[in-house]
Amino acid sequence: MTQPISDAEIQRFERSMSDKFGRQVAISGIPLKNFVDVDSGLLEKKVNSLIMQGATDEAGYWRDIARVYTMTTPIEVVGLHSMRDYKVRTGKMSRAALEEAGGKIDSVTLDVSNDEKIRYLYLEIDENDLRLGKINSIEDAIKTAGSAFAKHVRDDIISAYLTHKGADVEQALSTDKRYAALFKLAAKMNKKGFGMNCIIVDADDLVQAITEETDNGHLAWLTAMQAGASFGNNFASSIGNLNGHIGMFGAKVPIYVVGDTSASLNGTILGVDKDKGIAVGLYEDMRFAKNVNTMKDLVEAKIQARYDIEKANANAIGWVSGA
């Protein structure tokens, strides 16, 4: 098995490429064609960077919409902490009072020991492209594979939210505007001991929310990510691909728009406590199933990850129905 490439080797290669291009470049910014005849460790490092680039571009925000626990063993028990589990007591403490004051908390078991927890896909590099040296086509295939994998992980997370959403934290849209329903949902979750800190919405539902309410041509409740200024009511037609983090609700809660998903999100707006609703146990992050030593190895190369997703607290998974 090929030994992992050292940081010193990577730095030497980056310096040589920087000299070649006349500017400072990192592995991620060096075209794939420059790795055809280099050491295998450098090639695998480059291909990994392309996979992660594709993953980030499409759905890299999956890590931001749920609590991810890094697992060091195939089975782990993690504690679930909520404000509802803590009570300030007075006087002499009995055993029962000790538990009620936070001495006993819930937990969830994350288990990836079953091979069904492995997800994988093949890069699907065309042998003819490799033989003819169509590096741009090969690079695009690698990025697309990363995009597809990240999208799958994101959809798994959204599906888990939809499966485990709480019956006591449903807010029917009814005759409300969507922004009003979200404020009501946040209040309902607070009463259960959870705080809404992430909103996940289907692109079509976001368009409905945008077009139903404006204040002098602006959406006062939907602010830009950085500037903090309210969006104009025509921003939906100019923002481009409605996918990922696009703004803040009430200048505080991030909104993630899902433009294309296998999960049945349409008609439901998720308002969740992303740290308390579900638990994502990540035992193996996206990686190659075996080493990529040469360009030919890309033909049958596959990337895989091993993770488990479990319900933590249903009342931390709020939702607006009929949206």
Image (spheres, rainbow, N blue to C red):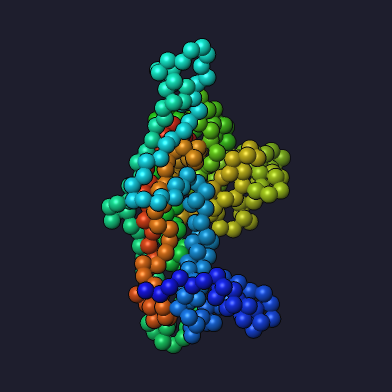
- Answer whether residue 317 is visible to the viewer in this image: no
Observer-nearest of 297 and 78: 78
Counting from the top left corner in percent of width and height, residue 39 is at 48, 80
* Residue 198 versus residue 37 in the image, above or below: above
Counting from the top left corner in percent of width and height, residue 71 is at 41, 50
Quadrant (top left/top right/bottom left/bottom right) for the N terminus: bottom left
Find the residue positioned furthest to the front: 92
Task: Indicate left or right for 135 with 224 as reference.
Answer: left
Counting from the top left corner in percent of width and height, residue 225 is at 65, 48
Residue 214 image-quadrant placement: top right
* Residue 276 versus residue 113 in the image, above or below: above
Q: Residue at x 46, y 47 (%)?
A: 68
Observer-nearest of 319 and 143: 143
> Number of labelled discs?
0
Q: Residue at x 56, y 58 (%)?
A: 241
Counting from the top left corner in percent of width and height, residue 86 is at 49, 25
Find the residue positioned furthest to the bottom: 132
- Answer whether residue 268 is visible to the viewer in this image: yes
Q: Residue at x 49, y 41 (%)?
A: 274
Task: Indicate left or right for 110 with 47 as reference.
Answer: left
Find the residue positioned furthest to the top: 91
Q: Residue at x 52, y 13 (%)?
A: 90
* Residue 238 versus residue 161 in the image, above or below: below
